[in-house]
Structures are given as structure tokens and as C-alpha cells.
Image (tube, rainbow, N blue to C red):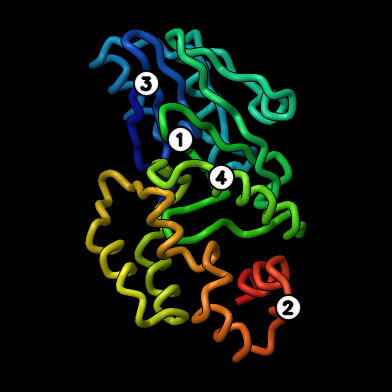
């Protein structure tokens, strides 16, 4: 089983190192110094550098990591569109295209884990900078098809703000209190089951969310309309 290690950088960005016994891959590796220290301490060799999408706050560490190691930069979106996987230490890491936040957004998956970038956060979702809410909806549906126990590692830590917003829509949802109580800033992670119970952008069919949409005079006739309406709140 591959290990996943999380590193904070900037205000709320989260970088990742996925590694086997000797090889490693950096995902959105902006925490360059911390990643290099980890690789040195654990005697891993950085083989690949990849990104969940091309926004500058996620690619900021690429040049340094490539200059300081023999790692290769992989085009994650091209791999995703071709259905290719990344082989690390003999294990495959899948790459799923998830357009919506950006046109080139991808999610990495392996061993019951999704590294979701700015597509799905812990408690919320990313902004739809492409303007294509239907594509974003379909991307999230791909992720929701994974088993409930699947772990979600996101590109930013927005947990506290996300729970605060969710409570304005579902003040009686006790799962939100449990979600916040389990939150650990030094390792931000949730399960898909927790997201289904807390994340309002996955709960657009729930009566409390539908009622909130009605109060705001937003369309609710179909599932895709409810999803688009939640994204406007």
C-alpha cells in the first residue's frame, strides 16, 4: 500500500507526497522545503511531480522540485484524458479528469484514497471558474461513485468556513458538529460518507437544502437545477 503524507504551505494550501518503500511522487508540491526534508529523512527518491490542475498556487513548487531532484514532470490532464495510470513502486495511481473548477482539473486515486485538488474539498467544493456547472456536476458524480469509506484529501483547508456556511443551510444537521470535532489541522482528511452527510454541495436533494433554495427563489425542479442553484448561494 502506498503512503500519503500531507504538507501545508501558503495560507491554506495542502501538498502531498505519495510514496512506496523507495520512490515518491509530489502532488501540488508547494511545500518544497518540507517535502525535501521528508524525502531526505525517509530516504525516498522523488520520481514524479504532478498537479491536480494548473493554477499557480498548486504549481508553485514544480520548478524547485525538478531542479533539486531527478524527478519528471507528468502532464496529469493528458494522462487522465487517455485513461493512463501512474506506476509508482509497482502500484498504479489512477488519474480522473474532473473539469469544473478548471478545464484541466484531475483527481488522483489509489488504495481507497482520492486526492481531489480544488474539485472536492473537505466540506465544500471549488469555485467553478470554467463556468460549466454541468461539467462540474458530472465530475462530482464520478467521485460519488467511489465507496463511502474512500478518504478525501483536498487542495486547501477550508473546513471551519465550510461548516459555518453549511450550518446556515442545515442548522439542525448534527453531522456537522461531529465533522468539525474530528477536524485536525495537521492532517485534513474526511471520508466520502462524511462528505455526503455534511457537504451542502453534495446534499442538494436534502429537504433542508431544497427549502433554502426555495427561500432564495432559485430553481429546484431537477437535480441539475438544484446543483446549479446551490452553487449560486
Secondary structure, mark 1, is: loop
* Location of mark 2 (residue): 221
Q: Give the mark, 2 or 3, whose residue is nearer the N terminus.
A: 3
Q: Residue at x 70, y 39 (%)?
A: 104
* CA neighbours of label 2 inside 10 A, class few (<14), some (14 to 19), many (20+): few
Distance from disc 2 to disc 3, alpha carbons, whole Å, reads 44 Å
- Where is mark 4, residue-wise? 145
How far is mark 4 from mark 2, CA to CA? 23 Å
The structure residue drawn at horizontal position 40% and vertical position 77%, both measured from the top left corner, is 167
Query: In the image, is 135 to the left or to the right of 26?
Result: right
Q: Is residue 42 left or right of residue 156?
A: left
Label 1 vs 3, first from the N-terminus: 3
* Up-down relation of residue 109 to residue 101 (above or below): above
Q: Is residue 174 above or below residue 212?
A: above
Question: As rendered, which of 199 and 131 lies closer to the eye?
Answer: 199
Q: Which percent across, then down, holds residue 117? A: 53, 43
SS at mark 2 in the image: loop
Which picture quadrant has residue 83? Answer: top right
Q: Comparing marks 1 and 3, which lies closer to the viewer?
A: 3
Q: Are marks 2 and 1 in contact (CB under 8 Å)?
A: no
For disc 1, the marked residue is: 30
Q: Residue at x 66, y 72 (%)?
A: 226
Q: Residue 61 location, x and y as percent?
A: 49, 31
Residue linked to disc 3: 2
Amino acid at each position: 500500500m502506498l503512503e500519503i503524507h500531507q504538507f501545508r504551505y501558503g495560507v491554506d494550501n495542502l501538498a502531498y507526497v505519495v510514496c512506496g518503500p523507495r520512490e515518491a511522487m509530489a502532488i501540488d508540491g508547494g511545500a518544497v522545503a518540507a517535502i525535501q526534508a521528508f524525502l531526505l529523512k525517509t530516504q525516498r527518491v522523488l520520481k514524479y511531480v504532478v498537479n491536480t490542475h494548473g493554477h499557480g498556487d498548486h504549481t508553485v513548487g514544480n520548478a524547485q522540485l525538478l531542479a533539486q531532484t531527478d524527478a519528471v514532470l507528468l502532464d496529469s490532464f493528458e494522462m487522465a484524458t487517455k485513461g493512463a495510470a501512474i506506476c509508482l513502486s509497482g502500484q498504479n495511481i489512477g488519474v480522473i479528469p474532473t473539469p469544473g473548477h478548471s478545464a484541466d482539473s484531475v483527481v488522483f486515486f489509489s488504495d481507497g484514497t482520492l486526492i481531489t485538488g480544488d474539485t472536492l474539498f473537505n466540506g465544500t467544493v471549488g469555485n467553478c471558474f470554467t463556468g460549466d456547472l454541468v461539467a462540474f456536476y458530472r465530475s462530482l458524480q464520478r467521485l460519488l461513485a467511489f465507496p463511502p469509506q474512500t478518504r478525501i484529501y483536498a487542495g486547501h483547508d477550508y473546513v471551519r468556513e465550510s461548516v459555518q456556511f453549511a450550518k446556515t443551510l442545515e442548522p439542525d444537521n448534527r453531522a456537522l458538529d461531529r465533522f468539525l470535532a474530528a477536524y485536525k489541522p495537521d492532517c485534513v482528511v474526511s471520508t466520502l460518507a462524511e462528505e455526503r452527510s455534511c457537504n451542502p454541495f453534495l446534499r442538494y436533494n436534502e429537504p433542508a437544502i431544497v427549502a433554502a433554495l426555495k427561500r432564495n427563489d432559485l430553481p429546484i425542479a431537477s437535480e441539475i437545477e438544484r446543483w446549479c442553484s446551490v452553487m449560486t448561494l
